Image (cartoon, rainbow, N blue to C red):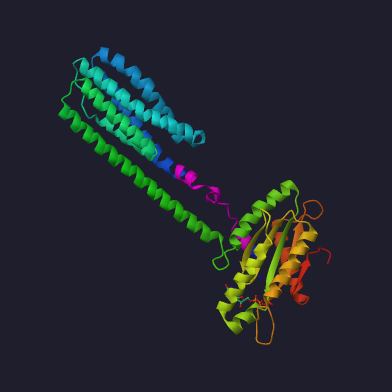
Amino acid sequence: MFDFYDFMAGSRVEVHYIQNETKRQYLIRQSLQLKKWALLGGLIYYILSTIADFRFPPAVYQQTIPARLFLVLVPLMFITWTYWRKDKFDYTFNLGLLLYLGIASGLVHGFVYYTVIMSGGFFPKVGMAMLLLYSCLLLGLPILFGAICAVVLIVTAAVVYYLTSMPVINIALLTAFYTLFSVCCLIANKVCYFILKENYQLVQKIYHISIYDELTQVFNRRYFVENLHRIYHQAKREQSMLSIVTIDLDNFKLLNDTYGHVAGDDALVKISTIIKKYCKRPLDFVARTGGDEFAVLLYGSNQSHIEGICKSILSDIKSLSIQSSDDGKIISASIGVASTDFKGSVYDIEELIHNSDVAAYQSKKNGKNRFTVFNSES
Ligand SMILES: Nc1nc2c(ncn2[C@@H]2O[C@H](COP(=O)(O)OP(=O)(O)OP(=O)(O)O)[C@@H](O)[C@H]2O)c(=O)[nH]1
């Protein structure tokens, strides 16, 4: 029989958060890394470009600095801070703020450009800082919001250029340039999304493999132990009955030796389907804990319900009539049950597992095809 002691001593496995995470949550969590760096880059460049405004005559920067400061810089600093301080993160709120920032930075940039040109100053048509901020914001936004933002920015730039009497051909060339640049940013955005999505699918697949038994598709023993710890503490808090039912098949080696491993595998699949049928409550679950051994965890079941389940499993397995040898022996099961109600009989997890193993062993010793409820006095 499989020894849980060894296994549990070395592997107190944490319940992985991926287990309860939706695809959306995963994508948000992963993309935070990319976005927080993109926003930091955008912030640094925006600060530099704001400082560079001092090259303009005082009348110009007196007009432009407040708009830059309050409409873009402060919100940008705030959002960058929230992306870096994950505990303060509110995805929906930040998304709205990001969209606002994308649009506001474009409008303010248009305003700065217009003010400088109208006062006779020089302002580069394609500002490097603006482009970097622009790309950072487009990388930070979901694709649809990024596209909306890009359209607003491009249209704003074209209108401002028109108002400053730029020749139409130049406006057309700059608009084409901005459009190309936006498309590149949005493609980069989409590629990142696809990479993250593929990673998510891969992680899910690996997670599935790590918790399920490949043959029977019930949980494996690693997951059984991991989940048992979690449910044990819940049962303790709620003072609920927690039971482990160990099901060890009889004459299974004989079946393998007589009819081969494929027949053995087929029997394991059929028997696991039967056992699964009796795990109906949300916290009940079944795992294959050894070659021909299964364990069932029952939460909040009373003794008569558990005994009813044991009887049904025994009779269902028997009625499969799986021959283990030519002399008519058929596959049956030896079952052991151990429970704790956290009031009268209090056992820790190791004791509970050990007790159900001892009870299953009793069933074997007493002639197989039966169940035994662990009793500390016997
Ligand atoms: N077909 C198949 N056999 C397996 C698998 N894993 C383990 N086994 C076999 O299961 C058998 C278990 O042997 P035992 O524990 O001695 O079981 P048993 O013959 O039922 O003996 P008793 O429990 O005393 O009735 C071994 O022959 C293993 O090779 C598997 O995935 N598929």
Residue 175 found in image quarter: top left
In this view of the protein, can residue 358 be seen by the observer?
A: no
Is the N terminus in the top left, top right, bottom left or bottom right quadrant?
Answer: bottom right
Q: Is residue 113 left or right of residue 279?
A: left
Query: Looking at the image, which residue is at 33% across and 30% down?
Result: 44
Query: Looking at the image, which residue is at 18% across and 16% down?
Result: 120
The furthest residue to the bottom: 327
Residue 187 drawn above or below residue 247: above
Q: Nearer the viewer, residue 334 or 306?
A: 306
Which secondary structure class fits the magenta region best?
Answer: helix
Is residue 215 magenta-colored? no
Chain part drawn in magenta: 7-28
In the rendered image, residue 336, in percent from the top left (x then y), is placed at: 74, 67
Q: Is residue 323 left or right of residue 176?
A: right
Q: Nearer the viewer, residue 355 or 294?
A: 294
Q: Is residue 137 left or right of residue 341?
A: left
Residue 311 drawn above or below residue 282: below
